[in-house]
Amino acid sequence: MDERVREHAEVLVDWSARIETGDDVVVSVAEDAHDLAVAVAEKLGERGANVVTLYDSAEVSRAYLKAHDGEFGDDPAHELALLEHADAYLRLGGGRNTTASADVPGETQRAFARAREGTREARMDTDWVSTVHPTRSLAQQAGMSYEEYQQFVYDAVLRDWESLADEMAQMKDVLDAGSEVRLLKEDTDLTMSIENRTAVNSAASVAYDSHNLPSGEVFTAPYATEGEVFFDVPMTIQSNRVTDVHLTFEDGEVVDFSAGQNEAVLGDILDTDEGARRLGELGIGMNRGIDRFTDSILFDEKMGDTVHLAVGRAYDSCLPEGESGNQSAVHVDMITDMSEDSKMLVDGELVQRNGTFRWEDGFEG
Amino acid sequence: MDERVREHAEVLVDWSARIETGDDVVVSVAEDAHDLAVAVAEKLGERGANVVTLYDSAEVSRAYLKAHDGEFGDDPAHELALLEHADAYLRLGGGRNTTASADVPGETQRAFARAREGTREARMDTDWVSTVHPTRSLAQQAGMSYEEYQQFVYDAVLRDWESLADEMAQMKDVLDAGSEVRLLKEDTDLTMSIENRTAVNSAASVAYDSHNLPSGEVFTAPYATEGEVFFDVPMTIQSNRVTDVHLTFEDGEVVDFSAGQNEAVLGDILDTDEGARRLGELGIGMNRGIDRFTDSILFDEKMGDTVHLAVGRAYDSCLPEGESGNQSAVHVDMITDMSEDSKMLVDGELVQRNGTFRWEDGFEG
């Protein structure tokens, strides 16, 4: 086995999920994530954790959803019981075809998501971490060769996370102290309130309320959004490529939208439920180990010099104790490039210009 | 997809497991059983069942077990909760290497089996069915080409089960009315009590207390075993080939044993616990659609003209209501060929001679 796979498993189990002896762990394995599953099992055995391994196949899900009449009942008792008794949930992505579900009607996918809110909540109540094993399918989506893509993934994952966490703490301090964020660039002048919200220093560990590996972003839960925003980075929503998204907000809600490709897919997302038209997340990418867009949200949104916004569900960790943020069955991230002709202001003060933060060399105030 | 895979899924879901709308189903998928998993998901979607899909990888288990210190705690709460809330459990076998666990110490495997008795019981309390998807690894173990092996599997699985169930009912009637079974052949003169036990007409459906697809055997839970028995069919125990097993019983327990190959593996099995030295099963193979040995117990034990005995755990379905039979963490089947120079007697009366039952043409009393 490639030694990098073992190192990946070690970061996941020890740094990210902080697994201890006796923990009840669920490991979800995508179709082609077998090698990482083997390495993770080895690490979990060493730690003396207990493991249930799930098979997360897009082709299996597609077959099920297409055959179903769409009347999905409540959350199934067995799935709910598994998740409610789990301490941690490790999702190992990496399928064989990123468009495997392209012919499942969006309506069916949304109905199924709504019928599984309880299991999703139970999963998110665990120490969950999501990562990906580099597969040929993901390399293809990224437009890269397989070996090049493997190196890309391990460059992003096998990092000095402690040191990156220290860097990101500066951005968190600015957001925690601030009340309003404003983004300015081409076709973009957007204002959001972040008063009374706590930013998460997402350092790829549950110890930082961070649940992605790799990570490297600081995010919060904005509200009262006003203005317009343009997302120049393409994205894949439910197996469909969506490009050049433009959203207009009034009173915190999307009142107008357009997209270059697959505008209807975007419209369906916004129609999922009431919360799908409000923002659930503002995230600031700070992982400069990720040096290019690869059409994978796990990596793209962490890239340095980018900002992303998500419509839909907010993470409770950004809210005051006991309060809930925006509720929705969906959480769809969209990314905008901040490297050129752009500004981010907090309470009217410039924090980032053309991708450079004010505490970095080369910052022009 | 090969249409036979869809037919296999239909037999499994409808005839074998009798899945209905709203059932909470666990599907366990071996490494190379993906295509069958897709077909089963489609069928479960049509029926409106709820599905949790497990990944059953021998390589993942091996990595976990080899890394673990062997101090396995009690049954994990999350796994137990999943199984206790499941209505049905469908095991789709078919890995990539039948000897994938060959280097896991037998002691570790047995300790793990003992520590998971609760989850095994919970699984067996569901409407569970075990089947296999034909894989190249299983074809290799059978000494067959891949296409030939696929046809072998579908010949055994895609049968008129209702008609086979009628045939087998005759054997069940003989055993239910009888008190003692005697087997006679080369190196074999074995007597077992079956008084007060109920035979199972194993017609590959939970409606018949039958949990294997394919099936085609009638089995019961013998006790008070006396004498000697020779198993001329080779078997694979925990990834090791074991041949020419000879057992001697006194007062229901194995007091002497030998094997041509891997005698130590057999010895380890018999030392697992107290129940591992007593018989848990007497089975009579009656599926003449299975026409050769393929070194897979799921098929071999169902073959016409064979009898198998298992040391270890007995199935409750053979016992009077409320009583438990032989208890053990193991259940290991061993097969003897009854096609030549052999007799099976029940209460001293000849029931089968050289493979032919007394209700069949050509029977010589």
Image: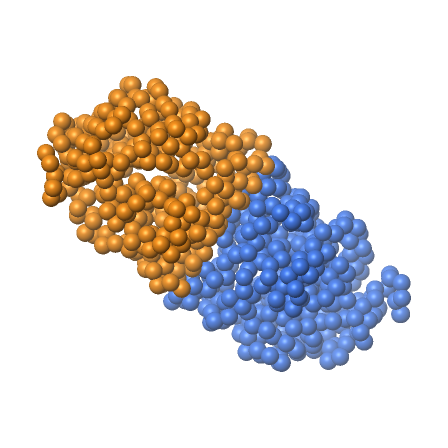
Chain colours: A blue, B orange
Q: Residue A292 placed where, x, y %?
A: 72, 66
Q: Nearer the viewer, residue A141 or A71?
A: A141
Q: Is residue A338 above or below residue B49?
A: below
Q: Is residue B195 visible?
A: no
Q: Residue B89 placed where, x, y %?
A: 38, 48
Q: Residue A132 placed where, x, y %?
A: 62, 56
Residue shown at 40%/56% (left/top)?
Answer: B36
Residue shown at 52%/35% (left/top)?
Answer: B104
Q: Is residue B170 left or right of residue B128?
A: left
Residue shown at 48%/33% (left/top)?
Answer: B109
Q: Nearer the viewer, residue B360 or B19?
A: B360
Q: Is residue A358 above or below residue A29?
A: below
Q: Is residue A96 left or right of residue A342?
A: left
Quadrant housing the C terminus of chain A: bottom right
Q: Is residue B144 above or below residue A97?
A: above
| Residue A279 picture quarter | bottom right
